[in-house]
Amino acid sequence: MRCIFCSAERPPSLEHIYSLAIGGTITTDRVCAGCNSILGSRVDSALNNFLPVRTRRAELGLAGNSGEPPSIFEMLLGDQKLIGPEANRIRTSLNKATGKLDHR
Ligand SMILES: [Zn+2]
C-alpha cells in the first residue's frame, strides 16, 4: 500500500478521517502506521483538546480512544488563587459521588 501522506510502500493502518474523539466513524486504510501516529499525536490531539471542542465533547459524551469523555467541570478543576487581601489558595475537585464541585 502506498501511503497518501509519505508516499512510501508500507503496511496500511486504519486512520479515522475525523477523529474518533469528535465522533468520526469514517476510516481509510491508505495511511501507514507512522503517518497515522503523527496525525494522532499532533493533529487530532490538538483539535480534540482545543477548549471549545473539548467542552462540546464533554456535553455530547464523546469519549474517543481514552474510553472516558472529558468532564464538563475539568476546566474548573485544580488550584485557583483568589484575588484580593484574602488571597488564600483553594483546590477545586469533582466529587464523583455527588457530581458537584468541592472547594477546599
Ligand atoms: Zn505514511
Image (cartoon, rainbow, N blue to C red):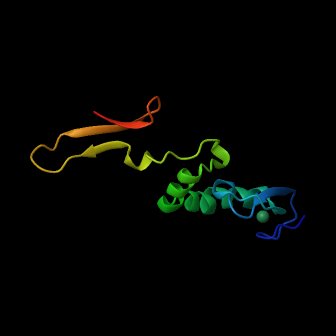
Q: Is residue 1 left or right of residue 84?
A: right
Question: Residue 5, how many percent across, how many down?
Answer: 76, 70
- The residue lying toward the viewer, choosing from 87 and 12, is 87
Q: Is residue 6 left or right of residue 69?
A: right
The percent position of residue 27, horizontal first and vertical second, equals 80, 60
Quadrant position of residue 68: top right
> Which part of the image, by quadrant, shows the N terminus?
bottom right
Q: Residue furthest right?
A: 1
Please name the residue shown 36% across and 42% down the image: 78
Residue at coordinates 23% horizontally, 46% vertically from top-left? 81
Work out whether residue 57 or residue 82 is closer to the camera in this orientation and state it: 57
Circle count: 0
Q: Quadrant of residue 7?
A: bottom right
The single residue placed furthest to the top in the displayed view is 97
| Ligand 1 quarter of the rendering | bottom right
Q: Residue at x 17, y 51 (%)?
A: 83
x and y, in percent, of residue 20 in the image: 69, 55
